Amino acid sequence: MRSPLAAAIPEVALWPTLAAPASTPIPGMNQAHLHLIFNHVPIVGSLFAAVLLAAGLFKHNLTLTKAGLIAVLAAGLFCLPAQLTGEGAAAIAQQLPRTSRALIHNHEEAAELGFWALEGAAALALFGLLLLKGASPKARLLALLALAATLLSYGLLARAGNLGGMIGHPEIREGFGTPDEL
């Protein structure tokens, strides 16, 4: 299954992927295991980064603001493994009972949107750090934009996480146990 990202941008097909379900560097673990480990980090990381950045901005504390911007960058970096293990996990999830392609597709779409929102927030954080280093008066504005983008990415990633949870936990699906469940 080729991601919409790879279809839209041919160069993405050259990015390293971990799409082979059985090939992982850790014996006894497959792509689904790795995806489940990595996918929680960007959600929690973006929330942590947003709280730290908000505290720095609203207290006018330069050290906390820098730490918050660095945390946004870190969350953006930690989002990459979750994105790169998604296709391998989807290949495994398609074989699970009570799992439809629509559930997987909805999760993929939501995760990709959250991924790009967090990557945008990370880019704003990087520019904000550069402006802070140069003592630019626009640094605070960029940090506020990074905060807004980080909060947006948290919401989008939390939604993606919920949709992903529906794949492996049918009990949280609306209509669980009815014919309309899938």
Image: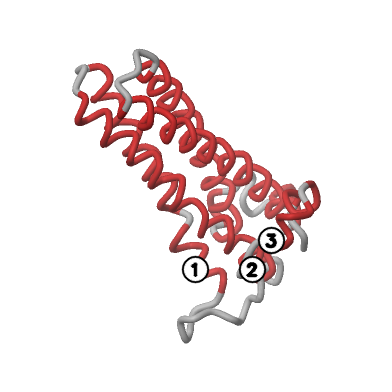
Distance between mark 3 and mark 1 Cα atoms: 19 Å
Q: Is residue 11 above or below residue 128?
A: below
* Foreground pick, 171 / 79: 79
Q: Earlier in the sequence, mark 2 or mark 3?
A: 2
Q: Secondary structure at mark 2?
A: helix
Could you tell me which residue is drawn at 50 percent across and 35 percent down?
A: 153
Mark 3, residue position: 99
For residue 88, which numbered disc appears in the image?
2
Could you tell me which residue is drawn at 39 percent across and 20 percent down?
A: 144
Could you tell me which residue is drawn at 50 percent across and 70 percent down?
A: 33
Distance between mark 2 and mark 3 Cα atoms: 15 Å
For residue 76, which numbered disc appears in the image?
none
Q: Amino acid at mark 3?
A: Thr
Q: Quadrant of residue 72?
A: top left
Label 2 CA crowd tier, 10 Å (few <14, some 14–19, many 20+): many
Label 1 CA crowd tier, 10 Å (few <14, some 14–19, many 20+): many
Q: Earlier in the sequence, mark 1 or mark 2?
A: 1
Q: Which residue reaches farthest top?
A: 137
* Foreground pick, 16 / 169: 16
Residue 114: x %, y % from top left = 56, 40
Residue 59 placement, left or right of 133: left
Q: Secondary structure at mark 1?
A: helix
Mark 1, residue position: 34
Q: Amino acid at mark 1?
A: Leu
Residue 116: x %, y % from top left = 59, 40
Residue 138: x %, y % from top left = 39, 15
Q: Amino acid at mark 2?
A: Gly
Q: How is the image coloured?
A: secondary structure
Could you tell me which residue is drawn at 21 percent across and 25 percent down?
A: 62
Q: Secondary structure at mark 3?
A: loop
Q: Is mark 2 in CB contact (under 8 Å) with mark 3? A: no
